Amino acid sequence: MDAHHITPRHVLRDLGYTIIISAVIAAFLTFTGITPKSFVIVLIVSQSFGVSIYSIIHFLFWVFKPQKTTSVVFTVMIGIAGGTLIGLQIGSFALQQIFSIALKQHDKSFLQTVTLAITFSSIISYFFYSRFRLRASEEVIQQEKIKRLSSEKEALEANLRLLQAQIEPHFLFNTLSNILSLLDTDLHKGKSMLMDLTRYLRTSLAKTRAEATTLGQEMEMIKAYLNIFKVRMEDRLRYRIEMPDNIKKLSFPPMLIQPLVENAIKHGIEPKVEGGEVNIRARKNGDVLRLEIADTGTGLHEDGTRGFGLSNVRERLQSLYGDRGQLILEENRPSGLKAIIEVPYAPD
Amino acid sequence: MPQIRAIVADDEDQLRKHLRSQLADCWPDLIICGEARNGQEALELIEQYRPDIAFLDIRMPGLSGMEVAQKIAGACWVVFVTAYDQYAVEAFEHEAIDYLLKPVTHERLQRTVNRLREQITSSHKPPLEISEIVERLMTSLPQRQAPAYLQFVRVQKGDGIRLIPVEEVYYFKASDKYTLVITKDGESLIKKPIKELADELDPQQFWRIHRGTIVNVQCIAQVSRSVTGRGIVRLKGRPESLAVSRQYIHLFKQM
């Protein structure tokens, strides 16, 4: 038991509980006829036991701060014994003052009173102790949560920065090698690849990218990206983009679709010996805008080796649209992964 | 002196052509006896032609260049080719393993060619221990280490199979031999028994609180405890509460 978890508010509240419980016990003892005395007398005795046992136990905990379960139990036992003795003194003093009744120390009902006091106070102490332990563990859970949340927030911010400035070096150097080579063998193809790379870099590197571009602009950048891979992978990659003109004009946050396309290429098609297809479709579905990025690659493994970037997109959708934006992952047929973004359809 | 032969392995056609033409400039006598488009082809070519040198791109579909080097165990001299593999390159430097960075420059290739020529003419044998070194590198490279815990569960949804990230699951509940997955969109059944899930999920993120229940720690709103010692977990965003059996109550006590 850790003493610094106990606040004055807790002490007062538990004292309140003690008084109520003592009253209930007194009522119970009187009305079941276990004691022949009147309710008021029993109430006075029961309150003096309850309050003194409660106070002594709290005092002992405050002084000794027991930690181990055995020392906690020991402290409670001492507290009950001491509290019973003191409660007895207070109770008999009060009864003598008010009703001029003396508790006879040797009769049967006296022994019964003490036994009852010890039994009830043991049960109540156990009740308080389990409540306390729970409170302590809840506090720790709360702290863990706060810690976790703040680290999650940091991670999210870091990810966002990364995402915005993300030009994968492997992609860049491989593409440059291709261009260099094409300058010797196919000047025209080399030039057009260089233009695609420029288009892609300009969009991804722009530091002050607007909060929202249009879907059409975003798709131009993705087309440039896929063109580059088409040159590099030749017939190992086929791709198709289907997007109605009215959807192209919609404004849309940057860098939401691109990570999914990159994921499809890098983890879906590239590792597959025979290559595959990437199909991108955008359509309006009632009041929902649905974007599908499907690949026929290696598919998502349950161990998450393809999961990178996906959680990023999910977090950004959550922060931009709340529960109205979502990323759905499905198995594509006959193979590969289908990533679906659903956001509210909002024409300007 | 017998003619020296090499193979070139890269999944990108243009880059194989390019390296070939650069080699033709730097080392006109070298015979390129084969080109491979993936790791498996590279392995087959090496077994078939027994070349003196293999230029192996690291990232290839099927087998990676490093896996190929590991399998051929000193059958020929290996030169790794990579566009960017920070950790691998550091390791190659450290272990004195030959490598080329794409785009390959003329000067760098010339140095590699000179070194290979010298090694081959002085009749050194290709080092046998390369497969050992590569194996050691592969286990230590960060990108090689797959996440150890389950990240997704596969769930039948309509006529498709949906992949649900485990962090979106509130809790798992045993249901006969199968398991119910409870998310904000409702319940779905998966075929994996709860015992198997308990072994595969990250124990930091998922706690087994009952023989038939695994809860996502992030979704716990409150834990209360009855006088009898049984615990009750209340969830964020779900009306039902979950029982914690005595066997697992220690998870909450130790905190």
Image (spheres, coloured by chain):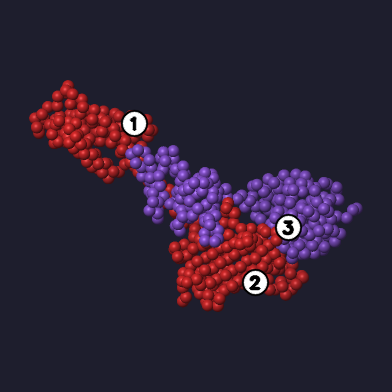
Chain colours: A red, B purple
The residue that disc 2 covers is A196
The residue that disc 1 covers is A73
Task: Using the numbered discs, state the Cα–Cα distance from disc 1 to disc 2 in whole angstroms.
Answer: 76 Å
The answer to whether the residue labelled 1 contacts the one labelled 3, judged by CB atoms less than 8 Å apart, is: no
Residue A68 image point, x, y percent = 38, 33
In the displayed structure image, the side of residue A335 where residue B54 appears, left or right: right
**In front here: B154 or A161?**
B154
View extreme (right): residue: B1
Task: Using the numbered discs, state the Cα–Cα distance from disc 3 to disc 2 in whole angstroms.
Answer: 26 Å
Q: Label for residue A325?
A: none
> Could you tell me if residue A8 is visible in this image?
no
Chain ID at mark 1: A
Which marked residue is nearer to the observer: mark 3 or mark 2? 3
Are there few (<14), some (14-19), or many (20+) residues within 10 Å of tag 3? many
Give the total number of marks visible in the rendering: 3
The residue that disc 3 covers is B38
The three-letter amino acid code for the residue at tag 3 is Asn
